[in-house]
């Protein structure tokens, strides 16, 4: 979609460490705070495992070139940990599929990424429930359904080259994105979360993902244009800088609003022309300027 590419990787701060259609209308991503989610899901013993049915569509997503979490090279404890979570991850994906996400690439990616590794140990038993959870600094990891839905809506059935995420948080969505796009850039404005994401992602050895500490409202003009942009935090409007960094024909997906928020999909249809579609209601942490 986008024309020229500069060499990848670029000199951004990175997760070094060497060697790992819009669906039928899904349910509303209900406004819940992560704290409430955590509390209510702790009370629900059935929530954790989720439905037992296996997903229909998702085959294994193609691994990015640098992804090498080889079972044989992982420590034994980690290996059994990963295997033990496979079934529950499959159940999570089956649930997301039932909620209306049908892109097999997205579902396949979510089947691979070990979501529990992005959540603090005290909450990791809740990693696969359909809820957002606290990650510190008043921020959350988004619920699995909304992660899948946003990526699906951004891809719209196409294979994407370069994509940008605003709001890395703990790094989970960035990891999922790395399985559906060739190159992923993700920006976080809170330094400790940027560092947390690096720590979480390092063992996965994903080579096509670059993390950047900075104000995502400015985007990454030095890397633009992007074949897709996702905002994981809600503003009252989408920053113009991000609209300008979208390739023509590409989609940007963002929650827009304050107390009441909706997902919007913006498509750049010309040099100075964009169209916008309003999708379902959702609830995200606020998009804020600057860095801390
Ligand atoms: N992508 C995450 C969700 C992160 S929560 C996931 O994998 O589930 C949203 C994140 O957006 C928070 O970490 C918050 O600090 C960040 N954020 C808010 N405004 C931002 C901005 N202007 N630039 C970069 N990150 C921002």
Image (tube, rainbow, N blue to C red):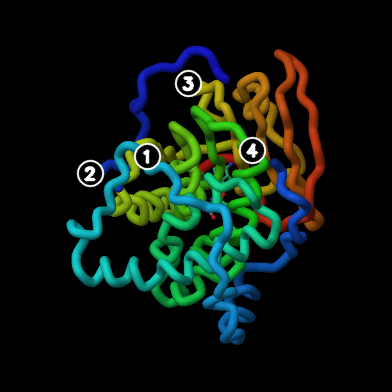
Residue 180 position within the rendered picture, expressed as x and y whole percent measured from the top left: 49, 40
Q: Nearer the viewer, mark 3 or mark 1?
A: 1
Q: Identify the residue under disc 2.
A: 19
Q: Identify the residue under disc 4.
A: 154
Residue positioned 37% across, 39% down in the render: 64
Residue positioned 52% across, 33% down in the render: 163
Mark with earlier residue (2, 1): 2
Establish if 146 lies above or below 275. below
Q: Nearer the viewer, residue 5 or 23?
A: 23
Q: Nearer the viewer, residue 9 or 284?
A: 9
Mark with earlier residue (4, 2): 2
Residue 21 position within the rendered picture, expressed as x and y whole percent measured from the top left: 69, 41
Disc 3, SS: loop
Instruction: Choose top left, top right, bottom left or bottom right for residue 203.
Output: bottom left
Mark with earlier residue (4, 1): 1
Mark with earlier residue (2, 3): 2
Check mark 3 vs ligand 1: CB closer than 8 Å? yes or no.
no
Q: Are marks 2 and 1 in contact (CB under 8 Å)?
A: no
> How many residues crowd around disc 1 within 10 Å: few (fewer than 14), some, or many (20 or more)?
some
Q: Is residue 140 visible?
A: no
Q: On the picture, is 36 further left or further right than 280?
A: left
Establish if 134 lies above or below 65. below
Q: Residue furthest front?
A: 56
Disc 2, SS: loop
Q: Identify the residue under disc 1.
A: 64
């Amino acid at each position: 979609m986008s024309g020229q590419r500069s060499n990848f990787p670029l000199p951004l701060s990175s997760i070094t460490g060497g060697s790992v259609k819009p669906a039928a209308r899904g349910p509303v991503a209900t406004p819940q705070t992560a704290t409430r989610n955590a509390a209510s899901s702790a009370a629900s013993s059935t929530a954790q495992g989720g439905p037992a049915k296996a997903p229909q569509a998702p085959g294994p997503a193609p691994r990015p070139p640098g992804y090498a979490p080889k079972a044989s090279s992982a420590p034994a404890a980690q290996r059994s940990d990963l295997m033990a979570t496979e079934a529950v991850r499959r159940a999570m994906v089956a649930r997301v599929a039932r909620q209306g996400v049908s892109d097999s690439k997205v579902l396949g990616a979510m089947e691979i990424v070990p979501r529990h590794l992005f959540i603090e140990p005290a909450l990791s038993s809740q990693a696969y429930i359909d809820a957002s959870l606290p990650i510190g600094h008043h921020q959350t990891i988004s619920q699995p359904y909304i992660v899948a839905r946003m990526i699906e809506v951004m891809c719209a059935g196409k294979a994407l080259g370069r994509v940008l995420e605003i709001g890395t948080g703990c790094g989970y969505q960035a990891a999922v994105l790395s399985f559906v796009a060739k190159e992923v850039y993700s920006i976080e404005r809170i330094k400790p979360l940027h560092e947390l994401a690096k720590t979480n992602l390092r063992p996965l050895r994903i080579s096509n993902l670059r993390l950047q500490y900075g104000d995502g409202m400015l985007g990454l003009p030095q890397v633009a244009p992007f074949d897709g942009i996702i905002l994981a935090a809600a503003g009252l409007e989408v920053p113009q800088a991000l609209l300008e960094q979208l390739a023509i024909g590409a989609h940007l997906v963002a929650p827009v609003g304050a107390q009441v928020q909706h997902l919007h999909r913006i498509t750049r249809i010309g040099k100075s022309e964009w169209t916008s579609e309003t999708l379902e209601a959702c609830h995200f942490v606020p998009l804020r300027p600057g860095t801390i």
